[in-house]
Image (cartoon, rainbow, N blue to C red):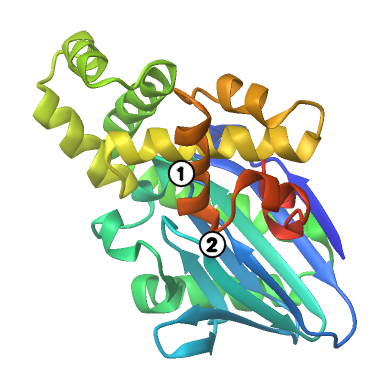
Amino acid sequence: MEFRHFQPAKVLAPYIRHYYVFESAGNAVYEDTVFPSGDMEIIFNLGEGIWESFREDGFQNNPAIELWGQITRPLQIRSSGAHLMLGVRFFTHATSFLLDDEIAIFNDQVSDLTDVMGAGIRHLHGTLQEAPSVTARIALLDEFFTSRLMRASGRQERLDRVAHILTSITKDATENNIGRIAGTFGITTRYLHKLVYQHTGLSPKSFDKIHRFKTSLKLIGENKMPLTSIAYDAGYFDQSHFIRDFKSFTGLTPSAYLSNLSAVNQMLID
């Protein structure tokens, strides 16, 4: 199993967190659970392996071009066969430069991106399969997403404003501070909630909960601190608050997760 990160072109850096390549060989069945990350992703499946995600009717095959919406609860996945996957991980606010739909309609789903974007994304998938190297594939992604960003140039000012709002929320997400943040940006609290939800699929409170959870997940993976210190450093009020939120996102207590770290989630942590 191999997992590598690549940085996008400079013009895309405020919107795309990174590209990544995931490769695996063999036919062993692999199962894991994906946790909320606060970010949406696109995954181009370029190999012959099969990925499945658990839905109401059980495990179902994921499409060749996957759009991962905001995951707000643990999602089981299963893999078989040899894989070559090329992923695009967007910053929390940024998928809306690419999609015209309300972001929240994709929450807790793995959608077929061809249903959303049509022939253009299907053509990109074909050229990615034919490209001779990872470098060539990254260049194709840069070209495609830069073109889409230029088409959405009218949205960039609003996207940048949402990015700054989210940064402010991570510093202090109390209800009183949400009002102060709104005032700083010259908008009402109600409009701040609307902006964040439209561009992220999350309320400010949900965004902050996932941000704290992701911080705790990273600290647990480093395994350098006791869980009580991790709870404090991740911004939780107390240990019970930490355990409650962590279990809602993983189905496990922090101590249970520590004894059986999830390979997929640890690889995806920034």
Q: Does residue 180 appear left or right of residue 71 in this picture?
A: left
Query: Of the residues shown, which amino acid type is indicated by label 1?
Result: Arg
Query: Of the residues shown, which amino acid type is indicated by label 2?
Result: Ile
User: Residue 226 is drawn in which quadrant?
Assistant: top right
Q: Residues within 10 Å of mark 2 (few under 14, many from 20)?
A: many
Dot label at residue 42? 2
Residue situated in front as seen by the camera: 85 or 270:
270
Residue situated in front as seen by the camera: 2 or 203:
203
Q: Does residue 109 appear left or right of residue 259 in this picture?
A: left
In percent of width and height, residue 136 lies at 77, 59
Residue at left offset 30%, top offset 55%: 103
* Helix, strand or loop at mark 2: strand
The residue mark sitting in front, 1 or 2, is 1
For label 1, the residue is 244
The number of numbered badges drawn on the structure is 2
In percent of width and height, residue 114 lies at 43, 77
Q: Does residue 79 appear left or right of residue 34 in this picture?
A: right
Is residue 270 in view from this perspective? no
